[in-house]
Amino acid sequence: MENNLLDLLKLDLGITHMLRDAYFLSLLESSRDQLKARGITLDTSVIDDKMLVVNYAAWTYRKRQTGEPLSPHLTQQIRNRVVKERAKDAKP
């Protein structure tokens, strides 16, 4: 599963070499933890959750150089996932 996320992240970033794989794996783990801190229980067997982790990790990687804020698309992805999580918890 980790390699799948790593491959997706590297595709997003346009990176083909393996020189930063250890860093990217740590970045994916950190992104997962940050999303969990927002109250999201991730299931990386679900494509939407996979892509959320990858998109968040890609943003984290890019923002360290550019300082760009969270994109509206990624912000909406996170909000939708938080709402889905809360709705799941609220079911009787």
Image (spheres, grey):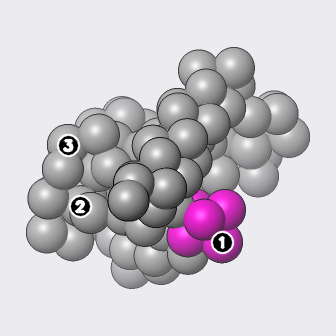
Residue 64 percent coordinates (x, y) = 76, 52
Going by the numbered disc 3, the residue's amino acid type is Ile
Taking the image as drawn, is residue 91 in sight? yes
Dot 1: what SS? Answer: helix
Mark drawn on residue 44:
2
Per the model, the C-alpha gap separating discs 3 and 2 is 7 Å
Residue extending farthest front: 92
Dominant SS type (magenta) = helix
Circles 3 and 1, Cβ within 8 Å, touching? The answer is no
Q: Does 62 appear above or below 4?
A: above
SS of the residue under disc 2: loop
* Quarter of the image with the N terminus in it: bottom left
Q: Amino acid at mark 2?
A: Thr
Q: Which residues are magenta?
A: 35-39
Q: Which badge, 2 or 1, is on the more N-terminal residue?
A: 1
Left or right: residue 17 versus residue 34 is left
Q: Give the label on residue 83, or none.
A: none
**Gap between marks 3 and 1 measured at Cα:** 20 Å
On the image, numbered disc 3 is attached to which residue? 47
Q: Residue at x 66, y 62 (%)?
A: 38
Q: Is residue 85 left or right of residue 45?
A: right
The residue drawn where x is 65% and y is 52% is 60
In the rendered image, residue 72, in percent from the top left (x then y), is placed at 69, 20
Instruction: Count neighbours of disc 2 (C-alpha within 10 A) and say few if under 14, some if 14 to 19, many if 20 or more.
Output: some
> Residue drawn 29% across and 40% down?
48
Q: Amino acid at mark 1?
A: Ala
